[in-house]
Amino acid sequence: MKLDQKGLQNREAWETAGYRLPRFDRVCVAAATRENPFWVHFGAGNIFRAFQANVVQNLLNDGVLDRGLVVAEGFDYEIIEKMNRPHDDYSILATLKADGTVEKTVVGSVMESLVLDSGKEEEYGRLKEIFAKDSLQMASFTITEKGYSLINGKGGLLPAVEADLKNGPARPESYMGKVASLLYARYRAGEKPLAMVSMDNCSHNGDKLYGAIHAFAEKWAANGLAEKGFLSYIEDREKVSFPWTMIDKITPRPDASVEEILKKDGVEDLEPVITSKNTYVAPFVNAEECEYLVIEDAFPGGRPNLEAGGLLFTDRETVDKVEKMKVCTCLNPLHTALAVFGCLLGYRLISEEMKDEALRKLAEGIGYREGLPVVVDPGILDPKEFLDTVVNVRIPNPFMPDTPQRIAADTSQKLAIRFGETIKAYAASPDLNVAELKLIPLVFAGWLRYLMGIDDEGNPFELSPDPLLETVCPCVAKLRLGGADGSEVERCVAELLKIDKIFGVDLYEVGMAGTVCGYLAEMLAGPGAVRRTLDKYV
């Protein structure tokens, strides 16, 4: 069983092995897509293959759509060259369900794959042709938050961006420069409308995309490298929109255990490829079954009935509320709490932690007891139902190979939004008191204990990457296992607890610093003290 056009002609073999196959005429759909593309997506990674591509496949199967997707990859061209094309743009989606079953789907909704390389005239020319089409309604993106950045870590322009701003839209090298150039081609084809839809997991993602594209349009127009009307085109939401979205679906790196399942079915050539840019790709993607994509309904050129595929369309304010519900209350705070204590207690899977009574109570308490009283209710999704699914289905899913070590990365960048907003809401409420919060300060203390790089048995472990490690680790460097009173602990970490950029608030100003220091002192009593402290307070 080979995953390509020829191999899939033997439908009986695939269906006997339990695979769901495309039910539409792919030759006809491909021809229609090539002539009148409606959706081009940038970023050929796992989330796209597991989510957007599968949604379009379902709509093609149901006859809601008659055209498929065009995908373009602008960061790692080898994904297209070594994965998409050898498999005729087919991929396998292995949906890992919480009940232990694996749903296997051959996804064939991608009709054309291209590299976003201005140096390859045929491919870049084809993208310009697509962007000039009347039929194009949406260009979407899953390129990670850093894909929209024009600056380096020191605040200076990236060299490719600087060159593109200077040289204009003819042959740009930066990712956003190339996208801006394609939009310029659409402008010159008649100022045709288009929705530019970031689907990356970052706050107000449409604004990040707009800011990047606007920078190019403004500079090119000012320097005579593009027509002045191009800037007006980008700034006119009736012509080019940059909607906000909220996406939520866990798609870990292709897992070896899933590869073995597919191999036993008889599927050949499943070996993953590690590209020269260190991207890990395989002919299959494994993902959880739960998925959410909420999109601001701002499509100046119209759009098909994507609601039929489960996507939720609403206004910008509601998208913002959904994001806050997820990030500040119902998912991300629970993940961070489990990540910190999972590292300290030696866990290697997030799902295993939910079998630990104390850790499960910690997660439930942060969500239900401390979070829900101040949750932002978006209306379009019920917060308690969302949280119920997180606690009972998503996090405990034993088939999701997600680790506390991965989620613990960049914790200093996450605490403010994941917990600080709840603290602020308690402080602002006439009916609530910050002193009622017992588990959020426990997580803060756990993070400080984690920064020591010593687990609960007294053994060293490697901290996950975090841009502030050099700033925060010296604050705990003098702490030792074996007993420390609260005042001694406070002398070490006091300055850190005042940094509102880390915690979202000054912990002294809200009266939480003493509680954090007290918890931390108990966690330093010796080996096993983290476990005893958890058992005591959850």
Image (cartoon, helix red, strand yellow):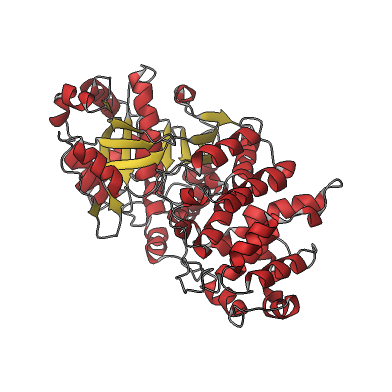
Horizontal side of residue 309 vs 44, given as left or right: right
Query: Which residue is at 16% across, 36% downward?
Result: 266
Q: Where is 226 relative to 530, above or below?
A: above
> Which quarter of the rendering shows the N terminus?
top left
Above or below: residue 259 compared with residue 507: above
Observer able to see residue 280? yes
Q: Position of residue 376 (x, y in %)?
A: 69, 40
The one of 382 and 307 positioned closer to us in this rendering = 382
Percent from the top left, x then y, of residue 60? 34, 22
Asked if one can make out residue 507 in the rendered structure from this viewpoint, the answer is no
Name the quarter where the C terminus is drawn: bottom right
* Picture mark count: 0
Residue 467: give x, y in percent of width and height. Answer: 51, 68
Snapshot quadrant of residue 320 = top right
Q: Residue at x 24, y 46 (%)?
A: 80
Residue at image coords 54%, 68% = 456
Q: Is residue 178 above or below residue 453?
A: above
User: Residue 466 appears at what percent x and percent y?
Assistant: 50, 67
User: Closer to the camera, 123 or 363?
Assistant: 363
Residue extending farthest to the top is 63
